[in-house]
Image (cartoon, rainbow, N blue to C red):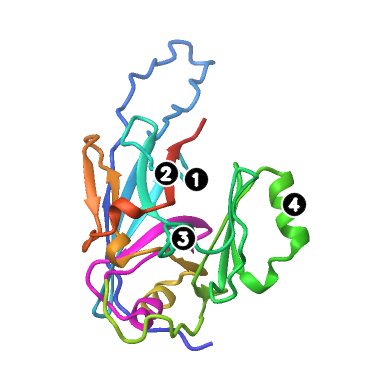
């Protein structure tokens, strides 16, 4: 396979764990146990430059990704919030939407080519044509969550998307990257094709689009516990119906 050529710069913003005092063993026959440090719950922001495209990765550290149909509050338990599925003209959620085993939207839309299934311990992105009635029954039985969106990348390959034409917007996606999941956002307005290419070039395995445009308002909590708003053109914020949230692990 031919390797892609691109430049990559990572800027990590993080909190360093405080060093703890260590007790020195006075008996030469005793050996102190290695110091165990716990990284605090936080969102790490990683800026990645791919050619002319800049991507921001919002990585959850000691946080779970959850699906919500009620607007998340900025509180000690929540560290990031962004829109997930599309909201219809009638202020309902587009596509199938299941929250912890409870149906909220039952209409499967084939135009929404990707589906995300979330549980307490796992998250998976797959093609919508693999979502059967039996799979949905399992999601409900296991009290998992599910929503539909546009599939952008599947198994490291770009999936053709003509829904947005050649318009340029700031783009956002839920991505599987380096065996973990996080939210990715473009630093500037891109066509959907350029955004997809940047995701593939940086090594994203799977990517599912997240609602943007007038629905782009999101926020994350920085290391000083301050609310940092992300997104632009937020005229439809008041009509948002669903969100992906980073929550503290129980």
Q: Nearer the viewer, mark 3 or mark 4?
A: 3
The residue segment tinted magenta is: 170-197
Residues under labels 2 and 3: Cα distance? Answer: 16 Å
The disc label shown at residue 85, or none: 3
Q: In the rendered image of this protein, does residue 74 appear above or below residue 104?
A: above
Q: Earlier in the sequence, mark 2 or mark 1?
A: 1
Q: Nearer the viewer, mark 1 or mark 3?
A: 3
Q: Residue at x 48, y 67 (%)?
A: 208
Residue 109 image offset from top left, x and y in percent: 58, 70
Magenta stretch: residue 185 in it?
A: yes
Element class at badge 4: helix
Residues under labels 3 and 4: Cα distance? Answer: 21 Å
Q: Residue at x 32, y 86 (%)?
A: 166
Residue 120 image offset from top left, x and y in percent: 59, 41
Q: In the rendered image of this protein, does residue 107 appear above or below residue 102?
A: below
The residue at which mark 4 appears reads as: 138
Element class at badge 3: loop
Residues under labels 1 and 3: Cα distance? Answer: 13 Å
The residue at which mark 2 appears reads as: 246
The residue at which mark 1 appears reads as: 66
The reply, left or right, for residue 78 in relation to residue 31 is left
Q: Residue at x 39, y 32 (%)?
A: 77
* Quadrant of res 162: bottom left
Q: Residue at x 39, y 51 (%)?
A: 59
């Amino acid at each position: 396979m031919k390797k892609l050529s691109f430049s990559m710069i990572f800027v990590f913003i993080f909190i360093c764990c405080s060093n703890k005092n260590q007790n020195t063993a006075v008996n030469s026959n005793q050996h102190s146990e290695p110091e165990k440090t716990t990284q605090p719950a936080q969102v790490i922001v990683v800026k990645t430059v791919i050619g002319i495209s800049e991507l921001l990765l919002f990585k959850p550290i000691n946080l779970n990704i959850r699906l919500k149909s009620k607007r998340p509050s900025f509180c000690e338990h929540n560290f990031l919030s962004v829109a997930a599925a599309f909201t219809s003209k009638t202020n309902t959620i587009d596509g199938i939407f299941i929250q912890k085993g409870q149906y909220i939207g039952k209409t499967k839309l084939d135009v929404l080519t990707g589906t995300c299934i979330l549980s307490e311990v796992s998250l998976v992105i797959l093609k919508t044509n693999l979502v059967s009635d039996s799979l949905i029954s399992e999601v409900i039985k296991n009290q998992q969550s599910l929503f539909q969106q546009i599939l952008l990348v599947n198994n490291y390959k770009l999936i053709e998307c003509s829904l947005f034409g050649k318009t340029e917007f700031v783009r956002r996606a839920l991505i599987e990257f380096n065996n973990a999941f996080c939210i990715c956002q473009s630093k500037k307005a891109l066509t959907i094709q350029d955004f997809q290419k940047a995701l593939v070039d940086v090594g994203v395995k799977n990517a599912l689009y997240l609602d943007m445009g007038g629905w782009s308002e999101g926020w994350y909590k920085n290391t000083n516990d301050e609310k940092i708003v992300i997104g632009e053109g937020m005229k439809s914020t008041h009509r948002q119906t669903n969100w992906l949230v980073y929550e503290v692990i129980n």
